[in-house]
Image (cartoon, rainbow, N blue to C red):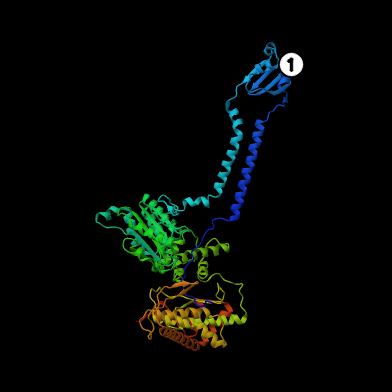
């Protein structure tokens, strides 16, 4: 359980979207098939109605009709092709058929009807023609064709998201933000902090607005800008701000979107992306997480398959193919610049690198003000205090903090966000939500209280440890309790003395449990992991061991194998044994320092533990009163002096 917290957070990214459920696709297909079948039957029924006669017909043979004509019973005959419709004197209508090659008069004469008798009958011959005639005759052929075409159209709509997209695999999936889009426009006013980074990028904005000024003096603007920094520091936001300030088209895509299961698709998408950008010039191409395709080739890491390497090769070729006046600039972002291929970083490609650091106190206050624009605040809100209590927070962490504070206020049916909401949101972002249902027994509560009190005593007494801001034994996340100790001022460098005191503070809970209860629990497990890793870094990375000397034995990065980091230490087994011995020596020294401090201030330890068992939480002001009552002077900013 992490009882001592080091404030260095990395926000998670994520996220993928599922394109479709096969069961839903099958349901849509069956629905479309049923709809098409129903329409087919309706068309057949309509055709039957159109072709069926509305009048009841009596069929007679041609010989019978000839006899009736001879007798004078027939008044008129309508000839429609080979069909005959005879109207009798009594109003009866009868139908018959004639020979297709002979005229009606010839046929009746052959049956013995006299010409005078034929002349007494009105014969009306209808010539076949018109739209209705052709529709009725062609309907048996057209209706099946129409149905088949309609059915194929329905099927094509269903498979459009799957197989039919095979024809668009080579097209770029970049998202385009046009200069006219005011809703998505971002400028440098929307980006707080990162002053040096914005100064570097202002040259890019100036070139996109007025390239002639640079070209007249023979200057060539960098073709590639690599934004480097920890996750959540605002790399993507800065890239969008450059496009917004310059008023140019912004093409954004993730490095992973180039690669598909088919070889050659990624390279095709790169060509299509650069083609679109050149057509829309001046423009900016932004590739987020470029390390997904830009890892070093030939090292067997990062899925070194032909598809990824072909995509990288195409990016290299496209960037080298620019002309000086083409006004297309490529920006990319990564938090792992050490794994990128050297060909990407050479002059002429990503030859300008902009590092974006975690914001300092003043920058954090400016970022908080930006995120506070649309939030109603109570009168007690002081963003300066919030900025002081969030060292190590990135821009994304601060956004999450402000959002969590608003959520807490809305959950309690309040219309304004108070300072109390923001303070609670800090702890929620760092450690997770309170787990009030996670109740401790009285024995566990006592152990946890003394454990946290041990951390607090050591942190308050040692000269180079950070002061305590809050102590709590209320469970948050996976921690049964925690001590929040924050530096009085932001630091870019950390000394060996500070590291040694941090290790002693981490072991304060460990020595307290062993001294008070004569036993150990699983509580200090995270403390031991953190402090041991810090001691090893001091020996192998920072050269802070007198015995090992100024030697870097391990690199800052390592490979990942089976979900764990694997350091590539190029040293012998004897040196490895010496490293282990030196790490153990540092840990033992820290434990002895913490044990001495706790024994010396045993009364202060008991007072803090008893107060924790009663109130469960001690804020900074109350904690400093306890320190003063036991003769310990609280640390102030002017008391911290780092000597060489």
- Residue at 58%, 43% (x, y): give it: 151
Residue 181 vertical placement versus 82 (above, below): below
- Asked if residue 417 shows in the view, the reply is no
Which residue is most to the top? 116
Q: In x, y percent, where is residue 468? A: 48, 78
Q: In this view, does 449 lie to the left or right of 234?
A: right
- The quadrant of the rendering that contains the C terminus is bottom left
**Residue 347 or residue 101, whichever sits in front:** 101
Residue 340 vertical placement versus 525 (above, below): above
Q: Name the residue under label 1.
A: 73
**Residue 530 or residue 417, whichever sits in front:** 530
Q: Residues within 10 Å of mark 1 (few under 14, many from 20)?
A: some
Q: In this view, does 583 lie to the left or right of 643?
A: right
**Residue 492 or residue 279, whichever sits in front:** 279
Q: Is mark 1 on a helix, strand or loop?
A: loop
Q: In x, y percent, where is residue 392? A: 44, 71
Quarter of the image for residue 131 reads top right
Quarter of the image for residue 267 reads bottom left
Q: In x, y percent, where is residue 15? A: 51, 61
Q: Is residue 615 left or right of residue 109?
A: left
Q: In x, y percent, where is residue 616? A: 57, 77
Residue 133 vertical placement versus 442 (above, below): above
**Residue 275 or residue 332, whichever sits in front:** 275
Quarter of the image for residue 153 reads top right
């Amino acid at each position: 359980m992490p009882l001592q917290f080091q404030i260095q957070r990395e926000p998670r990214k994520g996220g993928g979207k599922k394109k479709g459920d096969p069961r839903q696709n099958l349901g849509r297909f069956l629905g479309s098939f049923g709809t098409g079948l129903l329409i087919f039957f309706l068309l057949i029924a309509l055709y039957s109605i159109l072709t069926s006669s509305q009048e009841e017909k009596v069929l007679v043979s041609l010989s019978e009709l000839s006899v009736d004509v001879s007798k004078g019973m027939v008044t008129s005959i309508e000839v429609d092709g080979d069909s005959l419709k005879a109207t009798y004197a009594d109003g009866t209508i009868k139908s018959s058929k004639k020979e297709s090659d002979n005229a009606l008069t010839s046929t009746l004469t052959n049956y013995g009807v006299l010409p005078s008798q034929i002349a007494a009958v009105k014969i009306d011959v209808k010539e076949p023609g018109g739209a209705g005639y052709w529709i009725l005759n062609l309907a048996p052929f057209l209706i099946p064709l129409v149905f088949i075409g309609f059915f194929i159209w329905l099927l094509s709509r269903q498979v459009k998201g799957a197989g039919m997209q095979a024809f668009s695999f080579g097209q770029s999936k970049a998202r385009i933000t046009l200069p006219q889009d005011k809703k998505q426009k971002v400028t440098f006013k929307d980006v707080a902090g990162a002053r040096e980074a914005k100064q570097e990028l202002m040259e890019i904005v100036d070139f996109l607005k007025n390239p002639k000024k640079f070209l007249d003096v023979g200057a060539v603007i960098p073709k590639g800008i690599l934004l480097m920094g920890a996750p959540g520091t605002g790399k993507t936001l800065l890239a969008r701000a450059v496009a917004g300030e310059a008023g140019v088209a912004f093409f954004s895509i993730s490095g992973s979107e180039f690669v598909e299961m088919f070889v050659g698709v990624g390279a095709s998408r790169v060509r299509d992306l650069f083609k679109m950008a050149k057509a829309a010039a001046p423009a900016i191409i932004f590739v987020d997480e470029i390390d997904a395709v830009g890892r070093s080739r030939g090292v067997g890491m990062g899925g070194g398959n032909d598809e990824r390497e072909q995509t990288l090769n195409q990016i290299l070729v496209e960037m080298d193919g620019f002309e000086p006046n083409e006004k297309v600039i490529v920006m990319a972002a990564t938090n792992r610049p050490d794994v990128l291929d050297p060909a990407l970083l050479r002059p002429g490609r990503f030859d300008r690198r902009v590092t974006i650091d975690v914001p300092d106190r003043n920058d954090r206050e400016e970022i908080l003000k930006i995120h506070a624009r649309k939030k109603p605040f109570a009168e007690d809100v002081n963003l300066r205090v919030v900025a002081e209590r969030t060292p190590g927070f990135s821009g994304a962490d601060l956004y999450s903090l402000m959002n969590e504070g608003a959520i807490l206020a809305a959950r309690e049916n309040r219309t304004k966000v108070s300072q109390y909401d923001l303070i609670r949101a800090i702890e929620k972002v760092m450690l997770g939500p309170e787990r009030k249902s996670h109740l401790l027994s009285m024995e566990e509560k006592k152990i946890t209280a003394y454990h946290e009190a041990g951390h607090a005593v050591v942190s308050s007494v040692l000269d180079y440890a950070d002061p305590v801001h809050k102590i709590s034994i209320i469970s948050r996340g996976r921690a049964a309790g925690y001590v929040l100790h924050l530096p009085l001022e932001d630091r870019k460098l950390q000394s060996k003395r500070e590291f040694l005191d941090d290790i002693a503070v981490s072991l304060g809970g460990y020595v307290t449990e062993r001294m008070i209860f004569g036993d150990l629990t699983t509580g200090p497990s995270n403390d031991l992991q953190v402090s041991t890793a810090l001691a090893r870094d001091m020996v192998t990375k920072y050269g802070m061991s007198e015995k090992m000397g100024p030697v870097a034995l391990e690199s800052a990065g390592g490979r990942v194998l089976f979900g764990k980091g694997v350091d590539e230490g190029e040293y012998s087994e004897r040196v490895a044994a010496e490293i282990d011995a030196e790490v153990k020596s540092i840990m033992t020294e820290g434990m002895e320092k913490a044990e001495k401090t706790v024994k010396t201030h045993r009364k202060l330890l008991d007072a803090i533990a008893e107060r924790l068992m009663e109130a469960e939480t001690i804020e900074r002001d109350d904690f400093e009163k306890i320190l003063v009552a036991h003769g310990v002077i609280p640390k102030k900013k002017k008391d911290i002096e780092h000597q060489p």
